[in-house]
Amino acid sequence: MSSDTQNIVIVGAGFAGLNTFNFLHAKLSKLPDSRRPTLTLITPKPFFTHLPALLRTAVTSEGRLEDQILMPLTPPRFTDPHNKLIHASVTEVVDDDENGKGQRYVVLDTGARVEFSVLVVAPGSVWEGPLDFKGLNTKEEVVGRFEEWRGKFRKAKDIVLVGGGSIGAELAGEIKDLDPTKNVTIIHAKPLLFNEAYPDKYRKRAAKGFADRGVNLILDDYVDDVEIQEDGTVHTRSGKKVKADLVVPTRGPSPNTSFLASLSSASSPVLTKTGYVNVSSTLQLPSHPRIFAAGDIISWPEQKQAAKARNHAGVVAHNVLVLLGLEKKAMKEYKTGPEMILVTNGKNGGSGYADILWGIIFGNFFARLLKSKGLIIGMMKSALQL
């Protein structure tokens, strides 16, 4: 395509997609109109969803957090004459440059096609339980789902959370804030909470914080069937029977990448067996150099976190400009930073770990100050310029 028809398309308006859009918009807006590509953002929802606050919002209506965490995509940059905001889902990607024809486009669920010169895929993840909003694309629909879960948590007395990563742990803390008398049990497949990315010392300390609030921990065990049995229990693989009137899957997300499957070939699979996107160090798809990927969906040896997604976005935005001849520097390679985690335990507690120096562990005070109290809503809104 010639420079006056170049179109950069970004799929997904989560933390990775929006940061990529913002970085590119800041650079492209400085170019003369004759050199400036179109920047297109495709997302089914007219708002950004602040994931760290979803669990509290699903448990309680206190503070009407839904009015703060569903952040409308209304700033002027989204309606800039050189930018486009399309509310739709992508169902297929075509990248066929055979004989130089350059047939590159995405297919929308409306049936429309959007051509691209460069494509950035950052569609995020598909979640279970209280975080499952797939197909809910209006604020009213999402708030309705919140109300459903609030009712479930309000009525339940014996709640079993299947999965002891940060989602299960944080949800346990929110339920204990709602009503300390509720019987909450976390069943986790590993011998300690979270996973091996973090040291045992921290994982044990975090577990103690939840146990001190009366959360029951069943570790190194599995739940294969989340349905409550006739005797009012859920059964673990080891044979334990746990009393339950509500079972919540909190096993973590899956990458939202099914629309990329058609790009794969036997010699160059685009997706791993678990659906993550294979990328090079420049965050390009190896057999599709005009397609970049960012955020939770990439196959990379690191934990899936917002801070890393922002770093992905910086590398992708720079490399997109290099590929289009709008930046004369060399492409950047992505390098993983130190692992960090910050887990809330209700509004007033929590813990964290940073793999810097000797490995720093944070307790309730810093967790409350940095995340638990305000759920970094203001910081996120400012960082994304929403």
Image: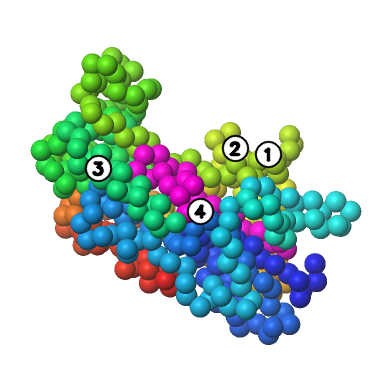
Q: Nearer the viewer, residue 328 or 296?
A: 296
Q: Identify the mark nearer the N-term, 4 or 2.
A: 2
Q: CA distance from mark 3 to mark 1?
A: 44 Å
The residue that disc 1 covers is 269
Query: Disc 3, disc 1: CB below 8 Å?
Result: no
Q: Identify the mark nearer the N-term, 3 or 1.
A: 3
x and y percentages locating residue 122 in the rendered image: 55, 54
Dot 4: few (<14), some (14–19), or many (≥20) neighbours within 10 Å? many
Going by the image, does 217 lie left or right of 199? left
The residue that disc 2 covers is 272
Q: Nearer the viewer, residue 95 or 142?
A: 142
Q: CA distance from mark 3 to mark 2?
A: 38 Å
Q: Which residues are magenta?
A: 116-137
Query: Disc 1, disc 2: CB below 8 Å?
Result: yes
Going by the image, does 267 lie left or right of 314? right
The total of numbered circles placed on residues is 4
Q: CA distance from mark 1 to mark 4?
A: 19 Å
- Residue 119 belongs to the span the image colors magenta: yes
Disc number for residue 151 = 3
The residue that disc 4 covers is 295
Q: What element does badge 3 sit on?
A: helix
Q: CA distance from mark 4 to mark 2?
A: 15 Å
User: Which picture quadrant has residue 234?
Assistant: top left
**Amino acid type at mark 4:** Gly
**Amino acid type at mark 3:** Gly
Q: What element does badge 4 sit on?
A: helix
Query: Disc 4, disc 2: CB below 8 Å?
Result: no
Identify the residue shown where x is 70% and y is 67%: 7
